[in-house]
Image (spheres, helix red, strand yellow):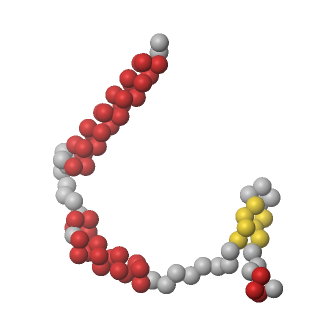
């Protein structure tokens, strides 16, 4: 019997949250503008190109044991 009130409240809360989000972010009821870095496709492509050009470095693979809080470096069979 109370399930219909709980489900109805959840649906209502989601609806109110959606309307508030739409008003604040899309219609900008508190003012402001969308930053150029978000709306400019050329800027986005240049940033993405820059991130892809950075070298990626990492250490050796590690097996983590959260219970004993000990981490073991995994040795590959080729280096043995």
The residue at the far bottom in this view is 79
The residue at the far top in this view is 1
Residue at 35% across, 34% down? 14
* Residue 60 in the figure: left or right of residue 72: left
Q: Nearer the viewer, residue 22 or 24?
A: 22
Q: Picture coordinates of residue 31 (x, y %)?
A: 18, 50
* Residue 57 in the figure: left or right of residue 45: right
Q: Picture coordinates of residue 8 (x, y %)?
A: 38, 23
Residue at 68% across, 78% down? 60
Which quarter of the picture shows residue 75? bottom right
Note whether 70 is above or below 15 in the view shown. Answer: below
Note whether 31 is above or below 45 in the view shown. Answer: above
If the image is split into quadrants, where does the C terminus sit? bottom right
Which quarter of the picture shows residue 6? top left
Residue at 25% across, 49% down? 25
Total numbered labels: 0
Q: Picture coordinates of residue 64 (x, y %)?
A: 72, 64
* Residue 29 in the figure: left or right of residue 44: left
The residue at the far front in this view is 77
Which quarter of the picture shows residue 38? bottom left
Residue at 21% across, 49% down? 26
Note whether 9 is above or below 39 in the view shown. Answer: above
Q: Picture coordinates of residue 39 (x, y %)?
A: 22, 65
């Amino acid at each position: 019997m109370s399930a219909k009130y709980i489900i109805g409240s959840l649906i209502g809360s989601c609806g109110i949250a959606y309307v508030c989000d739409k008003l604040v972010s899309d219609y900008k009821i508190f003012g402001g503008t969308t930053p150029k870095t978000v709306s400019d496709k050329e800027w986005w492509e240049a940033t993405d190109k820059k991130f892809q050009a950075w070298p990626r470095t990492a250490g050796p693979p590690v097996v983590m044991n959260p219970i004993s809080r000990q981490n073991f470096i995994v040795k590959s069979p080729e280096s043995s």
